[in-house]
Image (cartoon, rainbow, N blue to C red):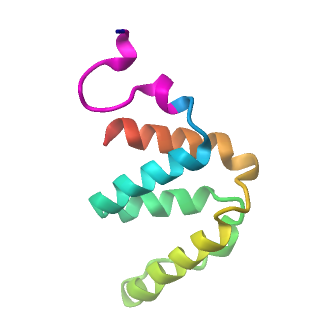
Amino acid sequence: MTESSGGATGPGFAELDALPTEELRERAFAVARDNRDIGFFWSVLRHLPHADDAAELDGSPNSVGPTIDDAVALWREFTGHGYDEAEPLLRAAFIDYLLKH
């Protein structure tokens, strides 16, 4: 009806913004997994409340396998612990990603 329904591609900004952060995360992660978009996961990890713990995961070519495993383990550890002050930024990242993909 309105501009937010735009095309037949997917939900608009208002619809996404009405969702809880965890639902946005689940949707964005599902799309990123389907697209094998590791860059998106790294950008999210950098904005998590305990991102300093992930700083040592430098992604050097010699450690790509272990680095991804470590990143997944970090995400699992942080999931459910709340987003703290990073929540608005993460919500925006999730919504932006879903709107673009």
Is 9 covered by the magenta stretch? yes
Is 101 covered by the magenta stretch? no
Is 98 above or below relative to 6? below
Is 41 above or below relative to 58? above
Residue at the top extreme, as displayed: 1
Quick one: quadrant of the C terminus?
top left
**Residue 2 x/y as whole percent:** 37, 9
Residue drawn at the location 51% of the way across and 44% of the way down: 93
**Residue 61 x/y as whole percent:** 36, 84
Residue 55 falls left or right of residue 39: right
Asked whether 49 or 61 is in front, the reply is 49
Is 21 above or below relative to 52? above
Residue drawn at the location 46% of the way across and 62% of the way down: 41
Residue drawn at the location 35% of the way across and 53% of the way down: 31
Residue 98 falls left or right of residue 16: left
Quick one: quadrant of the N terminus?
top left
**Residue 24 x/y as whole percent:** 52, 45
| Range of magenta residues | 2-16
Is 48 above or below relative to 3? below
Q: Quadrant of residue 35?
A: bottom left
Residue drawn at the location 54% of the way across and 30% of the way down: 17
Residue 46 falls left or right of residue 97: right
**Residue 44 x/y as whole percent:** 53, 57
Number of numbered discs visible in the structure rendering: 0
